[in-house]
Image (cartoon, coloured by chain):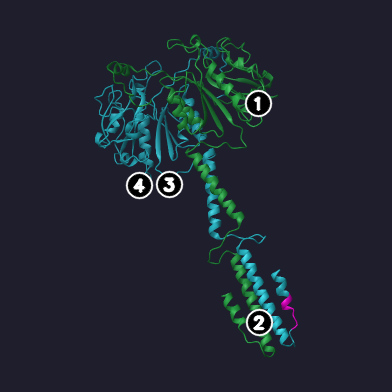
Chain colours: A green, B cyan
Amino acid sequence: MLLTIFDNNSKCNITSQEMGFKKKILAIFIIVVFLIFWFISLHNRGEVNRPQLPSSDLLLELSSLKDKLSKMSSDCHRDKLPEYEAHLPVIYAVTPTYARLVQKAELTRLSHTFLLVPNLHWIVVEDAEGPSSLVMKLLQHSKLNHTLLHKPTPKPQKLTEKEDHWKKHRGVDQRNEALQWIRENLDAEKNKGVMRWTKRVSVWPVGLVGGMMVERPLVDPKTGRVSGFNSGWRPDRLFPIDMAGFAINLGVLLRAPNAKFSFKVERGFQESEILHQLVTKDELEPMAANCTKVFVWHTRTETPKLPIEQELIKKGHRSDDAIEV
Amino acid sequence: MLLTIFDNNSKCNITSQEMGFKKKILAIFIIVVFLIFWFISLHNRGEVNRPQLPSSDLLLELSSLKDKLSKMSSDCHRDKLPEYEAHLPVIYAVTPTYARLVQKAELTRLSHTFLLVPNLHWIVVEDAEGPSSLVMKLLQHSKLNHTLLHKPTPKPQKLTEKEDHWKKHRGVDQRNEALQWIRENLDAEKNKGVMRWTKRVSVWPVGLVGGMMVERPLVDPKTGRVSGFNSGWRPDRLFPIDMAGFAINLGVLLRAPNAKFSFKVERGFQESEILHQLVTKDELEPMAANCTKVFVWHTRTETPKLPIEQELIKKGHRSDDAIEV
């Protein structure tokens, strides 16, 4: 429409005219300018019905939102390993494990809890000569960031099937293997961890352990510091707490290159063994609302009784032929 | 800039001038129109350095993306109950539960698995006279869509602490209570469920149950139908499978208003009792890659031994005073 007006005017005959013509030109000029401004104002209100290219800022924001949406959707639905969020320290969780009937069931449900935790790296250490296909596949399918290690317990130290589980140390070499991997692969400057926001060593209550409903650090409400422990079993331990009840800052661990677990201490003293090399009681940081909440429990899964399977095996056809359980 | 040009022109003296003036006016007119078009073209290329309102389509897309991002982020981080996704049938998962030492630990880890499943509604039924504070708070904090029910087992039917767990039926009245809630609150037309994509009743293997490594339906690879079961315990059952090994479509359940569990059948026959009212063996839909994969295990958590707690209770100060375990 504007172009038509412009063309009409340019074709006007302007060789010899009176004042009226000047007025007409001025009037047309004013009308055209007015129309153009009206057009621009319409345009700016976004009411003109024709395609419009957006500003580069908007395109960038749109594209960034689409990226975020797609990444989050993919993380949520676990189609790929999650990327670490830069602003959040990584939690390196160490799980020693050994082959048994309920191994896959127990690792599977632990992986479900870990999937809910952003920035978690799962270090699984098998008590075995090499990695097992079961654990390897489980980790691959878990959609968790992970590292699979293995270290067999020396035979004299290894529990036999008939021994009670508390008769010997468990997971000593496997936990040390994880510590070694951490020391060789992580850098205190680049990798912030182990347990989020822990400056040195943090502690919290553990339910159903040590023969009690809850074993926990006692916290002085005035100072907010750990003043003692409520443990009933061997309260003479330097750190009478359970393995599930503490976390160590990565930097602290890396600055103590020799700190590790040991077969040479009394049974039940592994926690004290590692912690006394890293921290004093006064430095402990109480978590879980000053150690007044239970977020962790010590449970044990029963060993299933499989009498019918024993019969099947005698007959030479087991129920789990070609099916991993 | 444009406004300045316009003002200058409107103030021109046009009372008495020669042809040169007409030419000047025309020239200015052409220049102004040219400038205005040049300005519009710049404007459209998004290179003009001033705020610009985008088209309503773009604003809508931007706003919709921001909404999705915020919803997904919130679902991911579980700050609020997730909304159901309209395109996905809801899974109504029924869990009968009873008060015991490991109750909170077990419900907590089950909730962690459920948190990974979109569109899940958890129906928890307590074997109790009323809802317990422990389960109520756990569900509130779980960030799962849920319904809490309760129904006490009549005393003659209830297991005592000293009886073996298989001596009596368990969860009969609680499961029936859940079925009743489903019938009273759900509509087959509006609510699609129970187990995603199940048309009638679907079945799959369960690990570590029935005295075997895996109890599973046998599937004829030619027809893709269930041809039998591998069960070793009471294979004469009509449906010799475990309670964890099947799901029922909501419509099928609602069209059979009397189908329920019963105290009147033999122990271990609850699965057959409910299923024979809803489906025939030929109609079963095999899941888990034609029942060749184990995604579900039957495990039992040991009852913790708490000798030190017993001593504490005698002395009048228990470890879990004011702390829920």
Establish whether labels 4 and 1 are both on one chain: no
Q: Is residue B81 visible?
A: no
Q: Secondary structure at mark 2?
A: helix
Residue position marked by numbered label 2 in the rendering? A27
Q: Give the letter of the chain under mark 3.
A: B
The residues bearing labels 4 and 3 have C-alpha atoms spaced at a distance of 14 Å
Identify residue for label 1: A251
Q: Tell me, for residue B86, which label it has, or none.
A: 3
Quarter of the picture holding the N terminus of chain A: bottom right
The mark lying in front, picked from 3 and 1, is 1
Q: Nearer the viewer, mark 4 or mark 1?
A: 1
Q: Nearer the viewer, mark 3 or mark 2?
A: 2
Of the numbered discs in the image, which one, if any, rests on residue B189? 4
Question: In screen coordinates, is B293 left or right of B110?
Answer: left
**Secondary structure of the residue carrying numbered label 1:** helix
Labels 1 and 2 positioned on one and the same chain = yes
Of badges 4 and 2, the one in the foreground is 2
> Which residue does the image show at 25% across and 26% down from the upper left?
B237
Q: Earlier in the sequence, mark 4 or mark 3?
A: 3
Q: Secondary structure at mark 4?
A: loop
Q: Is circle 3 on the same chain as circle 2?
A: no
- Whether residue A205 sits left or right of residue B93 in the image: it is right
Foreground pick, A297 / A191: A191
Q: Chain of mark 1?
A: A
In terms of sequence position, does the residue under pointer 1 or pointer 2 come before the other? 2
Of the pair B229 and B190, the residue shown nearer to us: B229
Q: Which residues are magenta?
A: B8-13
Image quadrant holding the C terminus of chain A, namely top left
Position in image of residue A129 (x %, y %): 47, 18
- Near mark 4 (Cα within 10 A), the count class, few <14, some 14-19 or many ≥20, is few
Q: Nearer the viewer, residue B101 or A128?
A: A128
Q: Is residue B274 above or below residue A131?
A: below
